[in-house]
Each structure stands twice: as structure tokens, then as C-alpha cells.
Image: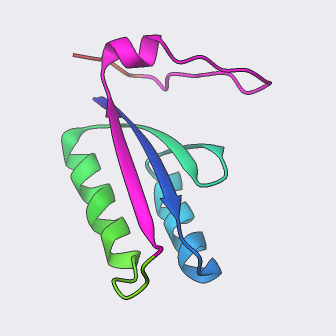
Amino acid sequence: MQFILVTYDIENDRRRTKIHKVLEGFGSAVQFSVFECFVSEDDYALMRMRLQKLLDPNHPLDSIRYYVLCRGCIERVDIDGNRHFEIQSPFIIS
């Protein structure tokens, strides 16, 4: 399993909603347009394929970013505010 932070910037409301719904199947929304996903390599590839189909290649501002974080990075996540960092079970960082 790997930890992926996914952020997106999509201007079109309809496409943004579709992207949000796809990501709900892979992780947890932690802020508007930000998801934390604990996924296998196969699920990561599937997630990216589904999301890429929703992007508008003609829209210059559409983007989805994937940050693959290592164990050391996950252990150093600092959060201020009311939302706590929760690791979904089962999760093993190798």
C-alpha cells in the first residue's frame, strides 16, 4: 500500500463533481479538492486512469496532482485544527 495525496483544480463544476466522486472510492477528502488515499499500485493506476478520462485536454487550467509520500513523510504530517490524520486499516508501509 502507498499513501498518495491528490489535489485537483478543475473549473467546470460538473467535471469537478465527477472527479470528487471517483476519489471518494479511493480515499478521504481532507479539504476542498484534496484527498488522502491509501492504495495499492493497481488501485493507484486505476484511479489515475479514471481521473485522466475526466480531464479536459483543451482546458489550460485543469490539473490533478499526485504526491506519493514515503513512510518518513507520513510520520511528519503536522495538522493544525480539528481534523486529525487517520490511517485507514489495513495499512502497511513498506
What residue is drawn where x is 43% and y is 84%? Answer: 59
Side (left or right) of 33 relative to 27:
right
Across and down, in percent, residue 57 comes to 33, 83
How many labels, in total?
0
Across and down, in percent, residue 21 comes to 54, 64
Side (left or right) of 15 relative to 84:
left
Q: Quick one: which residue is furthest to the front in this view?
A: 60
Side (left or right) of 83 relative to 36:
right
In depth, the one of 20 and 67 nearer the eye is: 67
What residue is drawn where x is 59% and y is 81%? Answer: 12
Is 49 within the magenta? no
In depth, the one of 67 and 18 nearer the eye is: 67
Give the position of the C terminus as an image quadrant.
top left
Point out the stretch of residues depicted in magenta: 61-89
Q: Quick one: which residue is furthest to the right in this view?
A: 82
Q: Is residue 5 above or below residue 92?
A: below
Across and down, in percent, residue 93 comes to 29, 17
Colour convention of the picture:
rainbow
Q: Is residue 60 above or below residue 9?
A: below
Q: Is residue 84 above or below residue 29?
A: above
Across and down, in percent, residue 68 comes to 31, 35
The picture quadrant where one finds residue 48 is bottom left
What residue is drawn where x is 78% and y is 24%? Answer: 81
Side (left or right) of 35 relative to 94:
right
Give the position of the N terminus as an image quadrant.
top left
Q: Is residue 57 above or below residue 25?
A: below
What residue is drawn where x is 53% and y is 45%? Answer: 35
The picture quadrant where one finds residue 41 is top left
